[in-house]
Amino acid sequence: MTAGTPSPDHEPVSASAYREAMAQLASAVHLVTTDGTGGRAGLTATSVCSVSDGPPTLLVCLNRNSSAYPVFLRNGVLCINTLGATQDRLAADFAGRVKQAERFDGRDWTTLRTGAPVLPGALVAFDCRIVDRHAVGTHDVLICAVEALGGIGGAEGLLYAGRRYRVLRREAPAAE
């Protein structure tokens, strides 16, 4: 059988096969953070995507079984902090290496319009209000209106592919 050819027995795709296939994709790495009446929480995510620029809207997928999930829903706001090449340890901390209560320690977080934590030094921060959500499998797709931007920088980006962090190198501009 060749790639792209369905299996003759039409078996459903297993969760483990799907995870292996998804590990082949390179994705930007983000810290998704929130703060408000529901408390403060944050996690590492790669499931972030632009939806529209009119009005500026993006989506992020959160697992409903995550301990942080109810905090995001109660607060109704979040910040997507896109990480740079040197922030892989921070990504691992927010992915579960460090307990939720300790993830924000030792860093000077700021805020923009919504009050969600903004990471100084992020490539970009999308400060958002959650305007809609859709349940899909184990996750909710959160539709987020971008209310403010911060930290738009030119550093190299952090990617996740092949089950490890990698760096997206910026090429020098071509000489004319």
Image (spheres, helix red, strand yellow):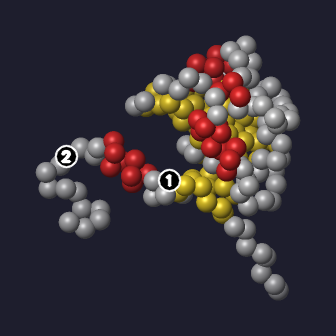
Image coordinates of residue 174 in percent, x first then y, are 77, 81
Looking at numbered disc 1 in the image, what kind of residue is underneath it? Arg
Q: Position of residue 135 (x, y in %)?
A: 46, 27
- Amino acid on which the number 2 mark rests in the picture: Glu
| Marks 2 and 1 close (CB-CB < 8 Å) | no
Callout 1 secondary element:
loop
Is residue 111 positioned above or below 5 on the image? above
Q: Residue at x 77, y 47 (%)?
A: 122
Q: From the viewer's perspective, is 85 left or right of 10?
A: right
At horizontal 39% and vertical 52% (from top left) the residue drawn is 20
Return the x and y of residue 10 as percentages of the image width and height: 17, 49
Residue farthest toward the top in the current orientation of the protein: 37
The secondary structure type at the circle numbered 2 is loop
| On-image quarter of the N terminus | bottom left
Quote the CA–CA distance across marks 2 and 1: 26 Å
Residue 150 found in image quarter = top right
Specify the label residue 11 is tagged with: 2
Q: Quadrant of the C terminus?
A: bottom right
Question: Badge 1: how crowded within 10 Å, few (<14), some, or many (20+)?
Answer: few
Closest to the observer: 162 or 117?
A: 162
Q: Is residue 107 visible?
A: yes
The image quadrant that residue 165 belongs to is: bottom right
First along the sequence among labels 2 and 1: 2
Residue at image point 68% right, 15% down: 38
Mark 2 Cα-neighbour bin, 10 Å: few <14, some 14–19, many ≥20: few
**Tag on residue 163?**
1
In-image side of 21 versus 83 (left or right) = left
Residue in view at x 73 percent, y 73 percent: 171
- Residue extending furthest toward the bottom: 176
Q: Is residue 170 above or below residue 36?
A: below
